[in-house]
Amino acid sequence: MQFCLRTAAVPYKEMRASDSGVSSAEMRERVEATQSIQQRRGFYNSHIPANRLRKLCVLDDAGERTLEMAVRHMGLSARAHNRILKVARTIADLGASETVCAKHVAEAVHDPGLDLGVRGRNHDGEGFNSSDANQLCISGNGPDGRKQTVPCRTRAGRQAGGS
């Protein structure tokens, strides 16, 4: 499974700081460790059969709530739900996490390379399809019970102003 993650621009001073971040060799090790984890499970995440998905992609409570919000607010199909779980599982594997948490699910939902065939509601509560949507936004209660909003994206994938 191939997916693309957008990252924020790095401020110039950070880029020039003495700490160079993760080296290519370190990243290669993380990817190889992730592949090893997936091989031990018996499947690369992109090939997990639907009947094994729930067992292999265990969500914590916050991850479950985040996925439910995404499915409800974006009107996602069962196929899109499963793709999100597989990508979130991969993100969790890269971080050596046994369970898939809310941040993994949110990152998977916002993966611009993941075609979700989005249908849902915009900020004004009007229905939309991904073909005519200007912005996507998920909001709801976080694990602490306080209102939480995931940043909006335009169709082009740029972050938009939001609630």
Image (tube, grey):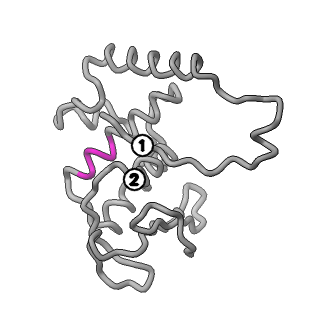
Q: Of marks 2 and 1, which one's residue comes earlier in the chain?
A: 1
Look at the image and say whether residue 97 sits in the magenta stretch.
no
Separation (CA) of disc 2 from disc 1: 7 Å
- The one nearer the camera, 24 or 162, is 24
Horizontal and vertical percent position of residue 66:
43, 55
Q: Identify the secondary structure beneath mark 2.
A: loop
Q: Do the residues labelled 2 and 1 touch (CB within 8 Å)?
A: yes
Look at the image and say whether residue 81 sits in the magenta stretch.
yes
Residue topped by disc 1: 4
Q: Residue at x 75, y 40 (%)?
A: 15
Quadrant location, the N terminus: top left
Query: How many other residues sit within 10 Å of disc 1, few (<14), some (14-19) or many (≥20)?
Result: few
Residue topped by disc 2: 112
Q: Quick check: 163 left or right of 136?
A: right
Query: How many other residues sit within 10 Å of disc 2, few (<14), some (14-19) or many (≥20)?
Result: some
Count of numbered labels shown in the rendering: 2
Q: Which kind of residue does numbered mark 1 sit on?
A: Cys
Q: Identify the secondary structure beneath mark 1.
A: loop
Q: Quick check: 56 left or right of 60?
A: left
Horizontal and vertical percent position of residue 138:
45, 66
Q: Quadrant of residue 45?
A: top left
Q: In this view, does 77 lie above or below 75?
A: above
Horizontal and vertical percent position of residue 117:
24, 61
Horizontal and vertical percent position of residue 133:
34, 75
Q: Which secondary structure type mostly characterizes the magenta part of the structure?
A: helix
Quadrant location, the C terminus: bottom right
Image: magenta residue range:
80-85
